[in-house]
Amino acid sequence: MEALVQDIRYALRGLARDRGLTVAVVATLALGIGANTTMFGVLDALLLRPPAQVQRADRLVRVYVRRTIVGPEFVTVPNTSVPAFESLRDGASGFSAVAAMHFGEMSLDRGRDAQQVAVGMVTYNFFPTLGVTPALGRFFGSDEDRVGGEPVAVVSHAFWRTRLGGSRAALGRPLRIGRGTYAVVGVAPEGFTGVNLAGPDVWLPLRGAVQELFPAEALTRRSWSWVRMVARLRDGARLEDAAAAANLAFRRAAAASDRPRDTTTTVLLGPIQAARGPNAINIEARVSLWIGAVAALVLLVACANVANLLLARGMGRRREIAIRLGLGSSRARVLRLVLTEALLLASAGGAVALLVAVWGGALVRDLLLPQLPGEATVLHWRVLAFTVGVSAAAGLLAGIAPALHSSRADLAGALRGGACDATPARARLRAALLATQVALTVVLLAGAGLFVRSLRGVDSLDLGLDLDHALRVQVNARAAGLDRAQSDALYLRLLERVRSVPGVERAAVTVGSPFSSEYVVDLRTSGRDSLVGPAFLNAVTAEYFASLGMRIVRGRGLTDADVSAAAPVTVVGRTFARQLWPGEDALGKCLYVNADQTTCVQVVGVVSDARLAELIEEPKLQYYLPLSRDSSGVSDLLVRTAVPARNAVTTVRRALQGSEADLPYLSVRALQDDVAAQKRSWRMGATMFLAFGLLALAIAAVGVCGVTAYGVSQRTREIGVRIALGAQPGGVVRLVLAQGVTAAAAGAAVGLLGAVALGRAVRSLLYGVAPADPLVLGSVTAAMLAVALLAAWLPARRATKVDPIVALQAE
């Protein structure tokens, strides 16, 4: 122990003397370790960390059902019905408890004071199943979790603190949620979010609050799949046995129900972390894992760079090491001394990395986990433990090669002196470390290029809509206690009101709209027995196409007069027209819609296709009818604004929210936000791959510069002799450049192979770009070599200024 303390003291004094190298090494390791700490914090919250305040989370599982669609095709979903939940709760022997839950957003208060709150509707046994206790008051019981039960609510700790004053007087306070009023009976423990990353503001009894969102039959019919389940395994029960028992109970109940086809459904159990799913992780978690792997590559680049720097430092200490060995120190003691220095540097880098994680973690979390509550921190004890482990590993990885080389020093040669280090093994090691940095950097930059091109491809898609100036306004009619006729009348009043709002250019109401809802009715055309695929209908008012920026490519759009016209009319999408009447003019053709298969609905216009649900879907058959009282029920108010839509959200919502005293909270959002959610995986990949790739590029550039500069210092005498014998500056520059650029070129060649392998591995996450895209690979290689050339040119230029006399005298 005393010898170790001496080594630490000596190492600290040495590092303090060599401040430049110390700062460079600590900064390099801090960036590499910080990137890994940040990403581990994200992955830990997403995939590993159990929900806060939950007891024995390892015994909790999420319940999924796998339903057959057609033939061998099936779909796995987390939603099922209340009767299916009851069959598992009462008949699955592998569970000690099963709870049901549904999450959504509802209106708190009415009129100008209306706010939107996240609501969790859960069965009374939800909290006991998770093993949590209230911070204040109580949770609701079975007598309240029933139709007609006492309307009560449990609020989250954050809601209680920020909106209810954080006092005990909040108990008993009434909250007007949806169309009911609920008394607060308890406060959930601090940090408790249920089983999701982000928890509700308010918890309501599932059966007692069902009328807020669904009709009464949602509690009794298996066709209503709207609840999710969480179960606690019975002590001693194995996961496989519990799944088999649940499957048996589910199918038995289905056989005697109104939905006997559920007898082919399979019950699956998955981890409590939703992102892990029953069989595989979701796409956002997959992208996050890839980004975590990228961060690990950045750390390898940093370690290779630090190893080169420590090798250079070791060569400057050859005489000191030789004297130590000559005075009787063992090679093991020298090895330990150098490793101690590397571990001290890595410890300092890890400490700085925590600062990097605190600063950069919030940015990364906002990009990768926007649903995480703001008060959640990346610096969990698990993250701290990970940082300590990674710092130790980085120190060993970066220090082992310099330590081995120092302990194997040529005693006689070192004591004779001389600055030259022409040992081929050491030169090859430095070149190999440099090539490794370059190869890994090329892989990272290629990954960034693939994701950037994918994102650009998605951004350049012609959606048939002007998303930048379109707002969507929606009303939760059921929460407002409105029937269909009352809801339609409210939308029409809002339509008239919004047209007078400054900055609003057009507005329309619709049944079905892009990225929100769609529906299909029976349809046929003259001359065709059937359509190729379903045809999606929107019932709209006159300014629908103008509100969304859709182009009329032939004929005309719809007008207010079309609603009451004697001859019904329709506008069809371009793909609809091409597919049904190829090579013909669609104008004047007839459609026969819904139950009335005799009345001709005449085509008066053809409009550009618009994406309905998915960004990268194929164009679908679309047609539009004038909105009338016979339509299915208004779903959206669409608004076109003169300014960018996101800048108009507050203005439009204020104007509409205060227009009626009993109006529930209106959802007003830019249409592009609905689309942005679908771009997240590509944006995540492009942003993080590019950020880490540029970081690796900077570290690699420093490595090329450092190795080349060190090579110049080792060949000072040779360069001096060459200049004395008449060598020109250009020749000296080429001589020096060859050392750094050759290693970089070799690394780039290896990196291209790795880039191709990476592209194939992430193929499913790309769009519109080949895994081995020549443009990406060529651009990345050229950029890497250009940076390497510039980094090597700086010390090469200094080499031309070597004074031959000074160089020879120093030798």
Image (cartoon, grey):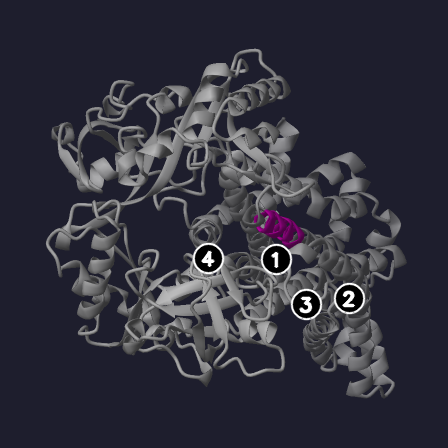
- Secondary structure under tag 4 reads loop
Q: Is residue 287 on the magenta stretch?
A: yes
Q: Farthest front residue?
A: 598
Spatial CA span between label 3 and label 4: 37 Å
* Amino acid at circle 2: Ala
Q: Position of residue 349 (x, y in %)?
A: 55, 48
Q: Position of residue 353 (x, y in %)?
A: 51, 48
Q: Residues within 10 Å of mark 2 (few under 14, many from 20)?
A: many
Q: Position of residue 695 (x, y in %)?
A: 59, 61
Spatial CA span between label 3 and label 2: 21 Å
Disc number lying in front (3 or 4): 4
Q: Residues within 10 Å of mark 4 (few under 14, many from 20)?
A: few
Left or right: 53 as drawn, with respect to 698: left
Tag 4 or tag 3, which sits nearer the N-term?
Answer: 4
* Amino acid at circle 4: Val
Q: What residue is pinned by disc 4?
A: 521
The residue positioned 20% from the left and 29% from the top of the image is 151
Query: Mark number for residue 795?
Result: none
* Amino acid at circle 3: Val
Disc number lying in front (1 or 2): 2
Q: What residue is pinned by disc 2?
A: 748
Query: Quick check: 86 above or below 286?
Result: above
Q: Nearer the viewer, residue 96 or 45?
A: 96
Spatial CA span between label 4 and label 1: 73 Å
Q: Do tag 3 and tag 1 residues touch (Cβ < 8 Å)?
A: no
Q: What residue is pinned by disc 1?
A: 21
